[in-house]
Amino acid sequence: MYDSIIIGCGAAGMTAALNILRNGKTVLILEKESIGGQIATSPKVENYPSIKAISGLDFSTQLFDQISDLGAEFEFEEVTELEKEDDIFKVTTNYNTYEAKTVVIACGAEHNIIKAKGTDKKGVSYCALCDGAFYKGEEVSVIGDANTALQYALLLAGICPKVNLCMLFDHYFGDQYLVDKVEKKENIKVYKELLLESVNGGDEMESLTFKNTKTGEEIVINSKAVFVAIGQTPKTDIYSHLVDRNKQYIITNEAMETKTDGLYAIGDCRNKEVRQLTTATSDGAICAVGINKYLS
Ligand SMILES: Cc1cc2nc3c(=O)[nH]c(=O)nc-3n(C[C@H](O)[C@H](O)[C@H](O)COP(=O)(O)OP(=O)(O)OC[C@H]3O[C@@H](n4cnc5c(N)ncnc54)[C@H](O)[C@@H]3O)c2cc1C
């Protein structure tokens, strides 16, 4: 039996683990994909206090090292069920069932899938850091208008001769700092009010067809790959009997408590205004304080 099981090894989950472990409690982290969650796919983080710039992967690795040194247990397993019986949580994964006195849902959010003809083609990617290098020297496109899309465009502009940034609306939703950087890059061309209609080509992608949402005009943009960053949604259905939700986001109070005693939700899966690294780690620290009190 663990004092706490944390579902998700992203920034929020690892920060909760850090602060629970420092109080001498036992922690198991369950992660279905990769250490670090979303931030591990970020080319460069420049808004985390006291760190001028760091790659998302380095940030995640350092945090993982920190909690491993404190004795965090970790398994690569996907949580498929969560139940509470007689004050004990039973956490079922694709391989095992574990028991814990408290559970932290830190399952983050997953990228939204773009829907248009041909989007199952080779060259459609949701991670520029993972796949960008395959298209070095090629003309590529990014679809999206917030921070992730801006970061992808900047990363790709360093390795590709031309990057087309295709936005659905006529304005950016990202930080002004990133917008300024994008607008100064000579090899990033920004297109506004475009809706993707199709991805074209045979075995290799050749172009993208968009419709201008204002004029109805069709526009074809040459592209060997397209990197999509059009928002995220959390996958929280398996917890729905134990928590209240707004859309898919889990509702908590300021102490990160859900409606079930001993069950907490933190990070990007939580119903809140700002989803970024600082708020994920802040949620993790706050919930750890509550858990340490709850356990004692
Ligand atoms: C490309 C990119 C760049 C970004 N850049 C910045 C930036 O520069 N600055 C900034 O402040 N923010 C940035 N963000 C946002 C930031 O990464 C997130 O707000 C933050 O990392 C969220 O952390 P989290 O722990 O809540 O969730 P996630 O990072 O989403 O982690 C959740 C983890 O839970 C796992 N999981 C989900 N369900 C299960 C399950 N059933 N069983 C087991 N494991 C499960 C997932 O696999 C994942 O690893 C960026 C995001 C992206 C995608």
Image (cartoon, rainbow, N blue to C red):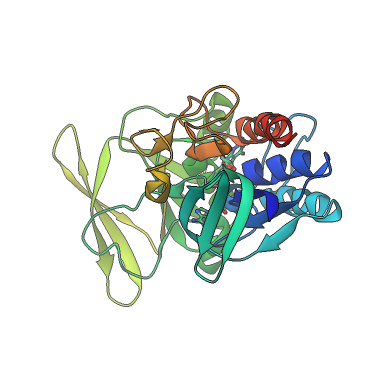
Q: Name the residue at 82% across, 39% down.
A: 23
Picture quarter with the N terminus: bottom right
Let me know if residue 65 appears in the view. yes
Q: Position of residue 155 (x, y in %)?
A: 58, 49
Picture quarter with the C terminus: top right
Number of callouts in the render? 0
Q: Is residue 240 left or right of residue 134?
A: left
226 and 161: which one is in front?
A: 226
225 and 41: which one is in front?
A: 41
Q: Position of residue 64 (x, y in %)?
A: 75, 53
View extreme (bottom): residue: 203
244 and 225: which one is in front?
A: 244
Q: Position of residue 218 (x, y in %)?
A: 17, 47
Compared to residue 134, the image places residue 3 above or below, namely above
Name the image quarter holding residue 119. bottom left
Q: Name the residue at 77% across, 54% down.
A: 72
Let me know if residue 265 appears in the view. no
177 and 265: which one is in front?
A: 265
Q: Is residue 20 left or right of residue 235?
A: right
View extreme (top): residue: 254
